[in-house]
Amino acid sequence: MKPLTEQEIRSAFVNCSKGEAKRLSVPRDLAERPWDDLDYLGWRDPQAPDRAYVVAELGDGLKGIVLRCPSAMVGQLRRSMCSMCVTTHTGGVSLMVAPKAGRAGQQGNSVGAYICSDLACSLYVRGKRDAGVGGRLHESLTLEEKIRRTVDNLAAFMAKVTA
Ligand SMILES: [Zn+2]
């Protein structure tokens, strides 16, 4: 993806208030992020480990979503699979819950998914970060197909958040 500025990131959020988007913690190392290898920008808030953020340009404009990780302390040793990039980790996948955009979110509706805890799906798919023994399934898909699948999974999740 193309490098993003803090301003672009803050204005992309669709499922939180404008005030929250203004205050939330945007990574300080944007210039050093491996943008060429990213399908989405994802990060955890170092001050609030139960908060995570995902920003992506998936065909219909740049969109950001705010996520909560209610089970941050639970199931750390369970082996589970990321529903975005299909990488299996032991203790490296978290259930993340996004409030829905708009009125549905204000009424408390949310959408959940199991996602790599470090939000580095793009790097696992490309083999640039190691998920440990057995992390990658043997698949006959090409790298391009795996990237496409990750992007499609994320787009489907974001569509549910904004529906
Ligand atoms: Zn993942």
Image (cartoon, rainbow, N blue to C red):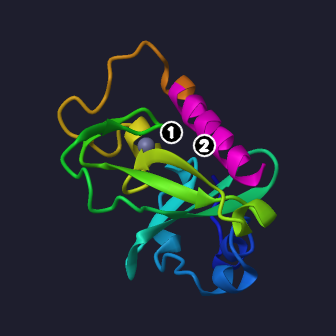
Please give left or right for residue 9 compared with residue 44 in the image. right
Q: Amino acid at mark 1?
A: Met
Please tell me which residue is depicted at 60% across the width and 87% down the height of the picture.
Answer: 23
- Tell me: 120 left or right of 40: left
Give the answer, above or below, for where 14 lies relative to 56. Answer: below
- Give left or right: position of 4 versus 130: right
Q: Is residue 32 above or below residue 128?
A: below
Q: Are marks 1 and 2 in contact (CB under 8 Å)?
A: yes
Please give left or right for residue 101 compared with residue 29 in the image: right
Disc 1 on helix, strand or loop? loop
Point out residue 125 in the picture as x, y percentages from the top left corner. Answer: 43, 36
Q: Position of residue 115 (x, y in %)?
A: 44, 47
Query: Would you identify the image quadrant in which residue 144 lies?
Result: top right
Q: Residues in magenta?
A: 146-163
Would you say the beta carbon of the disc 2 residue lies within 8 angstroms of ligand 1? Answer: no
Residue occupied by mark 2: 154
Residue 70 versus residue 147: which sits nearer the camera? 70
- How far, Cα to Cα, is label 1 from label 2? 6 Å
Question: Magenta segment: does it hold 55?
Answer: no
Q: Residue 84's mark?
A: 1
Q: Main secondary structure of the magenta part?
A: helix
The answer to whether 95 is drawn above or below residue 86 in the figure is below
Q: Say which element carries label 2.
A: helix
The x, y position of residue 7, in whole percent, is: 70, 79
122, 102: nearer the viewer: 102
